[in-house]
Amino acid sequence: MDVVKLQKQLVDYRASLYHEAFLDEQFTQLQELQDENNPDFVVEVVSLFFEDSERLLNELAKALEQQSIDFKRVDAHVHQLKGSSSSIGAQRVQKVCITFRNYCEEQNVEGCLKCLQQVKHEYSLVKTKLETMFKILAAGGSIPM
Amino acid sequence: MVLGKGASSSLSRKMVDGAEDMVSNCNDFTVLVVDDDPVIRKLHDMHLKKFGLSAQVVENGKTAVDLCHFGATFNLILMDKEMPIMDGVEATKELRAMGVNSLIVGVTSRDSQYETQAFMEAGLDFCFEKPLTADKISFILQELNKKN
């Protein structure tokens, strides 16, 4: 395996994620926290984000299926999703959450359902992108960030 | 009740739910992270590790209040605002009412100024937007140093 090629691939791929606003500088902060004592930190935090988000998305779907929707509950879940997505730099997910919260405040069911679809979509996009990036990393071994 | 700051004994105290609270000799400060989001908890914990601090982490305001009620003391408490069971505002009020003297720093998302004000009035020393960054932590530690 040509390490130099892989390195370039990683650098380019990562740059594209920033460029397309999938990630923002918060992700850079994550990378800066990783070191030799904590070599898997980024993967760990991102995996935690995946688990947590999937749980929240399930809860959201359930809450919005109810006959009488508890908007406070929906809002609480979206708030959490917004918080965790912003903390790893998943900008697009975070942005949808902001709109989502507005619809919750207005108790707008249709708006909420639309946002749920959108947030699911953005989440699955960023998840795929990050997983791809980790694969490139894994293939090339421990390439310094 | 001991409200000592910068306590530096290596005593190990058993907490109510079995969690051990070690006040270590090597660390300067004891820190409590209160947040319902596991991603944020891990992130803040790592930020603090970088400064040589190890934090206890709890999920909501009530657990934080209980810990302090049973005698745990902390130099610094990082308090999230929106949490289930007991939120940051309520928890801060209770801690201050208990006489807790720790530096309490609120951590909020980009919400209204009114909410931040209410949070500050509950007894915070500072309030920051989440997530915390290296700069903000550095600032907080400077304040901690001044206080102790």
Image: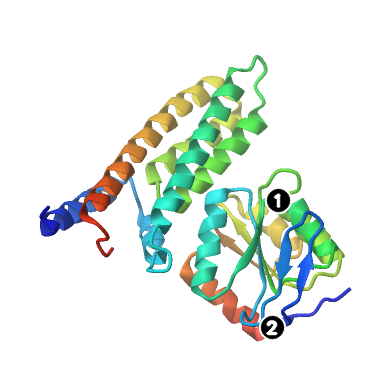
Looking at the image, tell me whether mark 2 or mark 1 is earlier in sequence order.
1
Give the residue displayed 48% in from the left and 46% down from the top: A48
Towards the viewer: B139 or B62: B62
Left/right of residue B19 with respect to residue A41 in the rendered view? right
**Residue that appears at 54% across and 61% down:** B44
**Residue B84, position in %: x, y?**
70, 43
Question: What chain does mark 1 sit on?
Answer: B
According to the picture, the residue beneath numbered tag 2 turns out to be B147
Quadrant location of the C terminus of chain A?
A: bottom left
For this orientation, the residue located farthest to the right is: B1
Whether pointer 2 and pointer 1 mark residues with C-beta atoms closer than 8 Å, the reply is no
Asked which quadrant contains residue A65, the reply is top right
Q: Is residue A127 above or below residue A59?
A: below
Q: Which residue is mark 1?
A: B60
Residue A122 circle label: none
**Exactly how many numbered labels are in the figure?**
2
A95 versus B107 height, above or below: above
